[in-house]
Amino acid sequence: MQIIIVGCGNVGVTLTAQLSGEGHDITIVDTNAKKLHLIASKYDVKGVVGNGASYLTLLEAGIESADVIIAVTSMDEQNLLSCLFARKAGGCHTIARVRNPEYIKEINYIKEELGISMIINPEYAAATEIARLLRFPSAIEINTFAKGKIELLKFKLPEGCKLCGAQLKKIGLLVNKCDVLICAVERGGEVVIPDGNFELAAGDLVSIVTSPANAARFFKQINIETNQVKDAIIVGGGAVSYYLAGQLCDMGISVVLMEKDHSRCEELSELLPKARIINGDEIDRDLLLEIGIRDTEAFAALTGIDEENIMLSLFAKRHSNAKIVTKVNRISFDEIVDNMDLGSVIYPRYITSEYIIQYVRAMQNSIGSNVETMYKLIGDRVEALEFSIREDSPVVGKPLMELNLKPNLLICSINHQGKVITPRGQDMMQVGDTVVVVTTNLGLNDVKDILK
């Protein structure tokens, strides 16, 4: 597809890298000529220097023939104006990043009146991801397929767990009536799509695919707590913290929010009447202990400084057994951060780009591709994809054991008429099914791409 990306900030660069890598025709637009040329050269895409909210600039970028425009500059109004001009000029799909909390209650009105296809608020999306994790604190990461019927969960295998030392083919003997498939294991910086002979070990980061009900039974049988947290401490009073505190209060979770700026505390006190707002230095160890970090069930480090968030999470790790969430904005050292045992690490720009790429993939679905949902996992080294099965697919009606599948690829789940099946060798994919595949073979666009 022909895609125009307006804005070469962190999200714009992430989108350029991922979408160009999937073979799309990308044009990037930015007022910073030096930065634009560096990115265009690195990813071999077209660059146009100019204001993305200018009609003439958009014409130069090829808006009349574009399939979609993605406006992700730092200015909400510019993003909305870019999309408005794009709709008038070419009638393409339009995606705008809108961050101002004042617009959150008007999103549907803005979409309808301006004809914008999708509006994404990175901070709200990040807060929603965190809230989902605090509903299920044993998980490090949760992704959903088949409209929530199937979940992909990642968790750390603790010392003493009954699965430690077990081969995957024998797990059925250890847990009863839990239709769960282990689809990926991270160990020592390496990623494995395991077979039945793979042996689990304490400290492994294990990803499973199953239904929500089966996930709950599975964790209960291996003695890992799955109940929603009762209370949470949030450090930092920015937009993510505001959205998260509101969602947690609505879930009945007791919230303490700590922010060092006095005027922001007063504002948050009015916006969040159910939360306890503390005015104090986020890195004041004594204050953190005083407000109950030793006893809290969840701790979220959400300041605007990555280094502070990392140190806060390490401090919480040492002094509590809380479910820990760490927000990281910069992704230059993501491999190092991921190895620091900071609980669930949230990258807002990854979440934003993931939502947008899911939309683009859905567009592709209508013009040839059949990817319904896609998540990039484990530092972009693994993809989890949900394919829709069509009548002309070469995989229809054949037992899975007879398919000549690519290596490092696992068919994890089949959703057949609303029934979730953990597939075995004799199972078959039928027309109308959706199928979840986890693989290290990146860039699959059609279910037939799973074959050699």
Image (cartoon, helix red, strand yellow):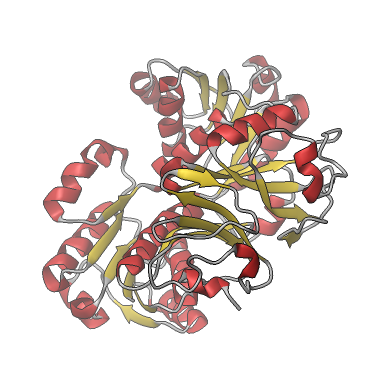
**Left or right: where 114 falls relative to 321:** left
Q: Quadrant of the N terminus?
A: bottom left
The residue lying toward the viewer, choosing from 331 and 324, is 324
> Image point 21% across, 66% down: which residue?
53
The residue lying toward the viewer, choosing from 414 and 293, is 414
Residue 322 placement (x, y as % from top left): 67, 26
The residue lying toward the viewer, choosing from 335 and 33, is 335
Residue 91 placement (x, y as % from top left): 16, 69
- Can I make out residue 380 in this image? no
**Left or right: where 359 falls relative to 379:** left
Displayed quadrant of residue 70? bottom left
Displayed quadrant of residue 361? bottom left
Q: How many marks?
A: 0
Residue 41 placement (x, y as % from top left): 48, 84
> Image point 43% across, 24% down: which residue?
265
> Image point 54% across, 67% down: which residue?
398
Displayed quadrant of residue 389? bottom left
Q: Quadrant of the C terminus?
A: bottom right
Residue 202 placement (x, y as % from top left): 84, 42
**Left or right: where 382 falls relative to 113:** right
- Can I make out residue 103 in this image? yes
> Image point 45% across, 25% down: which residue?
262
